[in-house]
Image (cartoon, rainbow, N blue to C red):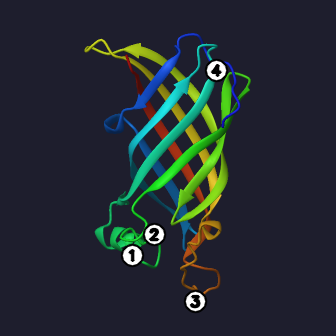
Amino acid sequence: MSTATAVPTELVAGTWTIDASHSEAGFSVRHAGISKVRGSVAITEGTIVVGEDLTVTSVTATLDPSTISTGDAGRDGHLKSADFFNVEQFTTWTFASTSVTATGSDYVIVGDLTIHGVTKPVELETEFNGTAVDPYNNLRAGFSASTTISRKEFGLTWNAALEAGGVLVSDKVVISIDIAAIKQA
């Protein structure tokens, strides 16, 4: 059960469904200690529930790790393999909020993130980007969020030693999320 925090009045009460075609989770991880690899994972579904008292009572999302894309087919295949995400065994990643608190004009959404069959608490630094009515008369809301995780905490331990010292893939992974949600009738 999530604790609740008041939201801007344009984010009206009810259930908001994440629009998967306009939402995405991105990530970046340091490679060989000198550069970053960036990629994305599709958000397939989710909801944001706003109570009648204009508080967010829950945020949920499901992601599909088989959609991982880094712009390199070989690397994508390796990430999908048992060395990393093992997408044949672990077919979804999930997020379920446990609390939402205001931090000035932004929010911190705390919740349980499950990747690779491991669930850990995370804090999403979240910005509400406003609402708009689209050409189809849907009320939409936009959000941006980010967090940093340790991939080892999620059982993702594959690595390779570098000749000069260090490892090929850093432990720290920065996750950035862009969400468009549609108010349901």
Q: Which of the two labelled residues, at mark 3 and mark 4, occupies the earlier sequence position?
A: 4
Q: Which of the two labelled residues, at mark 4 and mark 2, occupies the earlier sequence position?
A: 4
Q: Amino acid at mark 1?
A: Ser
Residue 111 marker: none
Q: Residue at x 49, y 19 (%)?
A: 14
Check disc 3: other Cα within 10 Å, few if <14, some if 14-19, many if 20+.
Answer: few
Q: Amino acid at mark 4?
A: Thr
Residue, disc 1 = 81
The reply to whether callout 3 and callout 2 are in contact (CB within 8 Å) is no
- Determine the secondary structure under disc 1: loop
The reply to whether callout 1 and callout 2 are in contact (CB within 8 Å) is yes
Give the image location of residue 56, x and y in percent. Answer: 61, 25
Q: Which of the two labelled residues, at mark 3 and mark 1, occupies the earlier sequence position?
A: 1
- Find the distance from the CA under tag 1 to the CA under tag 4: 40 Å
Work out which quarter of the rendered image holds the N terminus and state it.
Answer: top right
Residue, disc 4 = 55
Along the line of sight, which residue is nearer the eye, 169 or 20?
Answer: 20
Select label 3 or label 1 by which is in front: 1
- Determine the secondary structure under disc 2: loop
Select label 3 or label 2 by which is in front: 2
Work out which quarter of the rendered image holds the C terminus and state it.
Answer: top left
Q: Amino acid at mark 3?
A: Glu
Residue 79 placement: quadrant: bottom left
Residue, disc 2 = 85
Q: Amino acid at mark 2?
A: Phe
Residue, disc 3 = 163
- Find the distance from the CA under tag 3 to the CA under tag 1: 25 Å
Q: Which of the two labelled residues, at mark 1 and mark 4, occupies the earlier sequence position?
A: 4
Check disc 4: other Cα within 10 Å, few if <14, some if 14-19, many if 20+.
Answer: many
